[in-house]
Image (cartoon, rainbow, N blue to C red):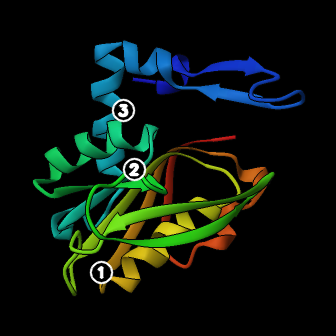
């Protein structure tokens, strides 16, 4: 199934001059949703050794949990500052328009566990890089970062020192 058929372009969102790639039509179609999750699993050549899958807030939670189920791995949500209820490690990162922070529970990953990081889109790479740093600080090994889509012109892949895969490249 061609999942690109289920990605909608929204002009001038969230601000003028931005062409937003909307995945909600993909999420609304059961066949496309299942196919997308299956294709994301196929992107990971090391799938059999994944212990945990991280989903990055918020859209990364959807496919991330589906990928974890298929890999028989645990699922870890990485959230924005102040959203997790237990002790956390935090990492700040730069956005195109400012700064933000992400957090992970301190006990989410054990030393030596193999981790797949998932988000819906790779743009500038700041978010994914911050999550890679959090995983490594907890003693985990990032096997791969995977995405539904990559905005190649923003060169986010260059920020990451790990294999990167995406189903769609723009």
| Sequence-wise first label, 2 or 3 | 3
Q: In this view, does 151 lie above or below 9?
A: below
**Of tags 1 and 3, which is closer to the observer?**
1
Query: Which label sits on residue 83?
Result: 2
Q: Are marks 2 and 1 in contact (CB under 8 Å)?
A: no
According to the picture, the residue beneath numbered tag 3 turns out to be: 36
104, above or below 152, in the image: below
For the residues carrying marks 2 and 3, which lies nearer the camera in this image?
2
Question: Where does the image place residue 157, in percent across and percent down from the top left?
Answer: 64, 64
Q: Which residue is drawn at 16% across and 65% down?
A: 48
Separation (CA) of disc 1 from disc 3: 26 Å
Give the structural element (helix, strand or loop) at label 3.
Answer: helix
Residue 31 bears which disc, if any? none
Residue 29 versus residue 79 in the image, above or below: above
Which residue corresponds to mark 1?
140
Q: How far apart are marks 2 and 1 (CA)?
A: 22 Å
Determine whether the residue tagged by mark 1 lies in a helix, strand or loop.
loop
């Amino acid at each position: 199934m061609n999942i690109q058929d289920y990605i909608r372009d929204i002009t001038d969102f969230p601000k003028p001059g931005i062409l937003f790639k909307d995945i909600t039509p993909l999420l609304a179609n059961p066949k496309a949703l299942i196919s997308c999750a299956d294709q994301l699993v196929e992107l990971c050549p090391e799938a059999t050794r994944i212990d945990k899958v991280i989903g990055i807030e918020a859209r990364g939670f959807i496919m991330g949990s589906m990928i974890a189920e298929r890999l028989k791995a645990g699922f870890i949500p990485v959230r924005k500052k102040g959203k997790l209820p237990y002790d956390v490690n935090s990492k700040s990162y730069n956005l195109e328009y400012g700064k933000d922070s992400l957090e992970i529970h301190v006990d989410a990953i054990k030393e030596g566990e193999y981790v797949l990081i998932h988000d819906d889109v790779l743009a500038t790479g700041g978010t994914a890089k911050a999550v890679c740093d959090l995983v490594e600080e907890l003693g985990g090994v990032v096997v791969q970062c995977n995405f539904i889509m990559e905005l190649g012109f923003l060169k986010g892949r260059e920020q990451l020192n790990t294999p990167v895969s995406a189903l769609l490249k723009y």
